[in-house]
Amino acid sequence: MKKIFVICGSTRKNSTNHRYIEAIKKILENNVQVTDLDSLINIPHFNPDDDNENAPAQVKEFRQQLCASDGIIISTPEYAMGIPGSLKNAIDWTVSSSSFSKKPVLLITAASLGQKAHLALMDVLNVIEADIVEQTAILIPFANAKIDNNNHITHSATEQTIIKAVQFFQNKL
């Protein structure tokens, strides 16, 4: 059984990005085990002085979850025209560990606009050697208007794009 680790870039409990994650889980094949990161807020601020064998326990656990996965799903908003700080902070903790290296990533940037965060996150994922390709990187502008409170994607073109991306992602696992 393939293992997928899911990271929500929003720290809000009932965010649009959480709803997209739940919608994606319904699309995933049954032969996968999905583990969600509890919350980005539990990962301490990145400090290069602590980025060693004595890294904080939350960081060690985060890295272990990434390493134990066959693939990673990230759904994130855009904050102030960029990557949410808590998501970038978590990723910064993985640079020296190569936890993302060669891992297939399905990236959803679900925001009002989202282009700047999406491009910046693509750059970051490429630098840390994640396996991110155009077919598994989706920008969903005006995302809140395309999904309901029951996690149903209401915009058919968005739904079809996500289904294709999920299928492509699962074929890479």
Image (cartoon, rainbow, N blue to C red):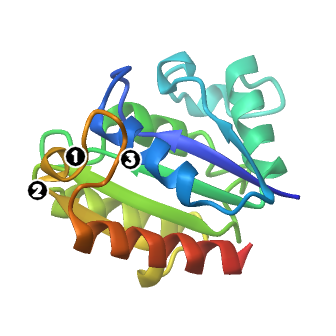
In the rendered image of this protein, does residue 69 appear above or below residue 173? above
The residue carrying pointer 2 sits among few (fewer than 14), some (14 to 19) or many (20 or more) residues within 10 Å by Cα, namely: some
The residue carrying pointer 1 sits among few (fewer than 14), some (14 to 19) or many (20 or more) residues within 10 Å by Cα, namely: many
**Kind of residue at badge 3:** Tyr
Q: In the image, what residue occupies the spot 33% across and 66% down?
A: 159
**Disc 3 target residue:** 20
Q: Position of residue 70 (x, y in %)?
A: 77, 61
Q: CA distance from mark 1 to mark 3?
A: 14 Å
Q: CA distance from mark 2 to mark 3?
A: 16 Å
Residue 4 in the figure: left or right of residue 18: right
**Disc 1 target residue:** 78
**Kind of residue at badge 1:** Glu
The residue carrying pointer 3 sits among few (fewer than 14), some (14 to 19) or many (20 or more) residues within 10 Å by Cα, namely: many
Q: Which mark is residue 125?
A: none
N-terminal of the pair, mark 1 or mark 3, is 3
The secondary element bearing badge 2 is classed as loop
N-terminal of the pair, mark 1 or mark 2, is 1
Tag 2 near tag 3, CB within 8 Å? no
